[in-house]
Amino acid sequence: MSYQDKNLTSCMQKDIEITLLPHQLDQDEIIKNKLLESLKLSENRIKSFEILKRSIDARSRKVIFRLQVRVFIDEEPAIDISVVTYQNVSDAKPVLIIGAGPSGLFAALQCIENGLKPIIIERGKDVKQRRRDLAAINKQGLVNTESNYCYGEGGAGTYSDGKLYTRSNKRGDINKVLQVFVDHGAEKDIMIDARPHIGTNKLPHIITAIKDTILNAGGEVFFDTQMTDIITEFGKVKGIEVNFEDKIYADHLILATGHSARDVYELLHRKNILIEAKPFALGVRIEHPQEIIDGAQYHCDIRSEFLPPAYYSLVEQVGARGVFSFCMCPGGIIAPCATGENEIVVNGWSPSKRNNPFANSGTVVQVTLDDVQGYDPLRMLNFQSEIEKLAFEAGGGNLVAPAQRMIDFVNNKLSIDLPRNSYLPGTKSVMLDNILPQFVSESLKAALPLFGKKMKGYYTNEAILVGVESRTSSTVRIPRDKESYQHPQIKGLYPCAEGAGYAGGIVSAAIDGINCANAILNSL
C-alpha cells in the first residue's frame, strides 16, 4: 500500500475554537456566523471551514460542545487527495501473524504496504460464524473455548464495543488507524470526536472489509487454526506448528494473540522463552440506569435529544492503591467474556447509538506483583483464573454471574433482590466479599462512596455490581527490545500489543501492530 498525498496550502488558514449549544451542532450557518464573529471578518471572506475536533463540555450547568475548526479565508481550500493502493504481495516474503484482532489486522495491512506477505493464523471463527457461538453463550451459558467474545475475527473488540479513544498519540499515527476504519465503512465522525466509537453492531462489517482488503492483496487468513508450537533453530524463528500437526515456515512471527490466550503463555514458558509476571487490575462491572448518569453529568432531569448518553471517568486513591473506572459503556450491555469452562468474566459493550437503558463500567483495583507471592511468571495469570472460577461457583453455573447492590456491598449486606440489568445469562445475589480478595473488596468499599461525592446519584442501591471484571489487561509481559521490537532470546519473534503487555485498546493495539510490521521491514 502506498499513500500519495497532495496538500497544497497556498490559501490562508486559521485554526480556532468555538462553542455551540447541543441543538446547534449540525447547523452550518450558525457555525459560520460564530466563525465570522470570532475572526471579525465579513461574510464573503470565509470560503470554507473544516471541523478538526469535537468534544462535550459539561462542567457547568449549561452543556456545550467545543469545536476546533480550520477556517479557509479568501481562497477555497486546496483539494487534499489521499490515494491508497495495495500492491499484490502473493509472492513476497511471508510474515506469520498470530491473531486476527486489531493488532494482527493492522500489522497485516502494514506488511502489505511494506511489500511483505502477511499470513494470519486465527484460532477462532470469522465474524459471521462467531455470532452463533455468542448466542449460545448469552442464551444457554455455553462457552466455545475457541470461539467467544475474545477469540475470533477482529478479536475482543469486534463484539465488545469498538471504543477508539486512546492516549497513544506518541506511539504512532492515530489518524492513520482511524482513516483505515473510515475507508472500510466507519462513520467519518470518528476522525473528529474526542471519544470516537464505532459500535458493536457496525464493527463486524468493518472488520470483514479489512480482511477482504488483506486477501485481495495476496495475504492469507486462516480461521479455526490454532498455533500449537513455535519452531526455532539456533535462537531464530523458523515457523510454527498449527493444530498439533501442520507446519508453516517463515522467519518472522508477530505474536498478537490478545490478553486471554493463556495457552500461548504456557507454551512460551514450557519452551523456556522468557516471559514475566505483570500487574493488572481486578474488580467488578458496575451498572446504573443511564438516566442516573445523564442527570449527574448533564445537570438535568431529562437528557436533551441533542446530547448523547453521558459518559464518566472516575478515579480514587485508596491508601497505596488506585481504584478507577474502566471501559465505560453509555447505553451499554454487560457481556459474558469467559474463554474457558467453569469461569465467569464480565465486560461491557455498546451499540453505535448507545440507546440501551443502562450504563456500565468496569470498576477495578490495582493488583501488584507483591500481592501474589512467588517468582512464577504465570502467578498473576493463575491468581486471575482462581478468582474467575470462584465467581463461576458462586453464580451456580450456566454463566450466571454473582452480583450485589452497591450500597449493600459497601455495608456488608446480602441484597434481598437485584435490580433489572443487562446481563443476559442472569445474576445471582451473593456476598461479593466471598469472591474478591480482601484488598480488592476493601478498596472498592472505600472508593464507591467517594465516587458518589464526585458524581451526584452514583452511590445508590439502584446500581448493581456484577463479578468479575478480571481481563482488564494482560497478566504476563513478553519482553522485547525497544528498538527492534524482537524478543531478546528469539530473533524474528515480535511480541505485540495487548497480549504481550504493550497496548490497552483497539487503537493502541493497531498502532503496535503497525510498529511491529515496520520493525520487520527495518530488520530486512
Image: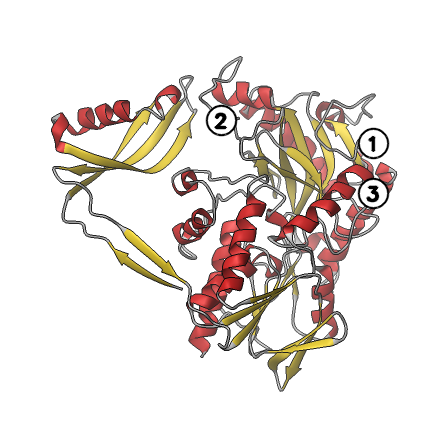
Q: Which residue is mark 2?
A: 308
Quadrant in which the N terminus appears: bottom left
**Amino acid residing under circle 1:** Val
Up/down of 153 relative to 354, above or below = below
Mark 2 vs mark 1: in front: 2
| Residue sticking out furthest to the bottom | 234
Q: Which residue is mark 1?
A: 430
Residue at 14 percent across and 49 percent down: it is 10
Q: Estimate the x, y position of residue 443 in percent, counting from the top left.
A: 67, 37
Q: Estimate the x, y position of residue 234 in percent, counting from the top left.
A: 62, 87
Up/down of 401 relative to 116, above or below = above
| Element under disc 1 | loop
Q: Which residue is mark 3?
A: 392
Mark 3 vs mark 1: in front: 3
Q: Nearer the viewer, residue 420 or 272?
A: 420
Up/down of 423 relative to 420, above or below = below
